[in-house]
Each structure stands twice: as structure tokens, then as C-alpha cells.
Amino acid sequence: MKNARLLRPNLEGKAFLNLHKRLETAIKDYDMVHPGDHIMVGLSGGKDSSLLLALLARKKVETTNDYRLSAIFVHLGFAGDDEKRDYLKEYCAMLGVPFYTVDEPIFKTFEREKKKPCYLCSRNRRIAIFKKAKEVGAAVIAFGHHRDDFMETYLLNILYGACTETMKPNNPFFGGEFRVIRPMLYMDEKAIAAEAKRRGIRTFPQGCPYSDSNERRFVKNLIAEAQGRHRRVRKSIFRAMFTVHPDYLLKEPSRKSVL
């Protein structure tokens, strides 16, 4: 396992245990894991999903330890995807987690579609994961979206979607046939990055040519700039997602022409 030779899979220091407690809290708050669940973790080659797999592989969740675990990587055809796949296969083997990979060459379809590539990529990747999950009997899909991702989605919807919403931590699909869970809800990206580095987890660039120019990157930079002006900005945005005062919100205008 030459690609994973620096990995320290059994390292459980104070920071790791703190993140695990945050994982447990999110799972408990949103009823994410049930006895007998088969959870498939979507791996991207990034720090978030790789650390999520290590946390879940610990099999010490407060609500239940009675769950199966597997992982999946969607090969999108981006530069470096072969290297990512090979490393993640070794990484999963070290954690004792079954690993699956599917090919979804989304990059080749970008020029043929008029929709924004980010939407197309996300949709096709998720469909590919659902198909493989059904094939192997995994009804729960876990993604490594963390606190910062929730905040960015919240602001994206305000700025571009004309609504006040974010991702759902526990989201049923297809009439409840599948559930998508996001157990890293209470974890900061900075803390995840530090722990991934400490454990020797290798991370890879996205490989997508649009990753530095999309709206999410703009919002991420916007939050970082605001945080630089006031240290409580991130905490305020996160709290705003569950601190709502309906009496101080507007009602829908009676005439659309005033919008």
C-alpha cells in the first residue's frame, strides 16, 4: 500500500475524539443512523469525506453501532481521478471498509449540455451513487458536507435562489428508499483539515476546471473576508440557520410587479 504508507488509521487523539463527539451529536440530533443500516460513504479524494469514513469506521456511535459501512468513488474523468481511485481503494482497505467505484465521465458531456456544469456534475454523480447503492443494498448515503458547506449553501440560496434554506442533514429520496445524511454538520472545515493532516490522510485537488470560478467559491471567499472583519461572523451565520424570528420577516407581495 505504497500510496497510503504515511496514513495513521488508529490515531485517536483529543482532536479526533472531539470531532467524533460532534459526529455523534449530529447523528443523534437528526436521527441519521438506525440499527441495521448499510451506510455508503461518498468519497471524493478530499479531506472531508476521507475523515468522515475514518470517524464512522470507528463503530462507536452513541445511538447504535449496528450498521454496515462501505464507500464509493465516482470516476468523473477529471485529471488525477485514476490516482484518487487507487489511493482511496488502499485507504478503505486499511480501514477494513468495502470499496466500490463507478465510471461517470461527466467531463465529456459538459460541452453538449446547456445547464451549468456544477449542477450537471452533482446530479449525475448522485444518480451514479444511488444506482450502485441499490445494487449492493445500501439505503443510507453519507456525504462529507461540514458546517462551512451548510453556511455557504445558505448564503447561495439567499443570493441566487431567492429563498432562505440550506441542505438537509437527513434527507429522504425516492419516497424514503434512500436517505442522504451529512454527519459532519457540526464540524468546522479548519478543524477537519488539521485532523486529516495529523492522521496522514492524503487529499487531492478537485481536478475540475470550473472549481475556482463558480458561485460557491465566491461565497466562500465572501465569508472569509467578513470573518476577517469580525471574528464571530461564521458562528453568526450558522446560528442564523436555526434562529428564526418569523414576525420580523416579510410576507409575499400582493403584486409581483413590485419585486
Image (cartoon, rainbow, N blue to C red):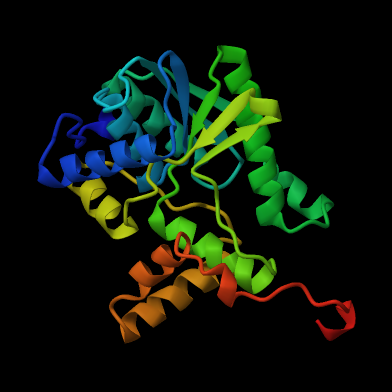
Along the line of sight, the residue nearer the viewer: 227 or 259: 259
The x and y percentages for residue 246 are 57, 68
Residue 77 is at least partly visible in this image: yes
The x and y percentages for residue 199 are 19, 41
The x and y percentages for residue 39 are 45, 23
Q: In the rendered view, would you say 78 is above or below 72?
A: below
Q: In the rendered view, would you say 166 is above or below 50?
A: below
Q: Residue at x 30, y 25 (%)?
A: 57
Along the line of sight, the residue nearer the viewer: 34 or 75: 34
Quarter the C terminus occupies: bottom right
Along the line of sight, the residue nearer the viewer: 88 or 152: 152
Residue 107 is at least partly visible in this image: no
Q: How many marks?
A: 0
Quadrant in the rendering for residue 124: top right
Residue 113 left/right relative to 200: right
Quadrant in the rendering for residue 29: top left
Q: In the rendered view, would you say 241 is above or below 170?
A: below
Residue 186 left/right relative to 222: left
Quarter the N terminus occupies: top left
Q: Residue at x 66, y 23 (%)?
A: 131
Q: Residue at x 67, y 76 (%)?
A: 250
Residue 63 left/right relative to 5: right
